[in-house]
Amino acid sequence: MKPTLFLAVTAQLVASCAVPAFAQTPLPAGATYSNDPKPLKSYAPVDNPGNTAFDVTDRAAIAKLIYAYSFAYDNFETEAWFSLFTDDVTFVAGTPGQKAVAFQGDGFRKFWRERMDAFRTSGNQRRHLMSNILFLDQTADTAHVSVVGLLTNSADGKVFSAVSSLNYEGWLVKGADGWKIQRWHDFPDSIVPQ
């Protein structure tokens, strides 16, 4: 193979690996473009963040739900991960320079099931490290949170790398069986390769 052709093929393969899963054309089945959501980039508290007028049990349950999000996803426990969301969940994902994509209902479940199945056999082990949970608003049965974290990857148990910093925003509701995610925005700070 000529060196020029080899370099062109290599460049194409590298570029194709850097495209996020939800930036495909056409859109994945069950997905739509979402024009309004953007990453949360500001913090202007209405009340003192040190205010103690909240239910500690609810805060602990919400934190546990967010940590379960990471553990279930990272361990390919698809059904356990889906159980963290309401039946009518809206999941919006976007990366810098790309239109955000929204998933709902069967489209949400189909896309993320296929993505987890692909990772299960890829030789890659992702870890979501959810480090900062900030409660933007909370009532007795609703919560609005911002979550910042780090996504890492271990390839074939040999090469460790940081993939991206994470910027999540979530709207949660409390029902008879506890807290669940009703809407989730997933906006990493950089393009996340598959």
Image (cartoon, rainbow, N blue to C red):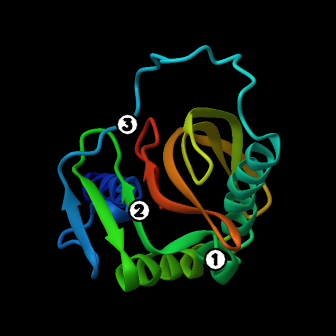
- Residue 146 on image: x %, y %: 54, 37
Label 2 sits on what residue type? Phe
Q: Mark 2 or mark 1, which is nearer the start of the sequence?
A: 1
Label 3 sits on what residue type? Pro
Q: Is residue 51 left or right of residue 186?
A: right
Q: Is mark 2 on a helix, strand or loop?
A: strand
Depth check, mark 3 against mark 1: the one in front is: 1
The residue that label 2 is drawn on is 91
- Kindly report the distance in space between the C-alpha atoms of the residues bearing marks 1 and 2: 14 Å
Q: Is residue 102 left or right of residue 42?
A: left
- Kindly report the distance in space between the C-alpha atoms of the residues bearing marks 3 and 1: 25 Å
**Residue 59: quadrant of the picture:** top right
- Kindly report the distance in space between the C-alpha atoms of the residues bearing marks 3 and 2: 13 Å
**Residue at 48 percent of width and 18 percent of height:** 46
Label 1 sits on what residue type? Ser
The residue that label 3 is drawn on is 39
Q: Which residue is more in the foreground, 80 or 6? A: 80
- Quadrant location of the N terminus in the rendered image: bottom left
Q: Would you call the spot at circle 1 few (<14 residues within 10 Å), some (14-19), or many (20 or more)?
A: few
**Residue 177: quadrant of the picture:** bottom right
Q: Is mark 1 on a helix, strand or loop?
A: loop
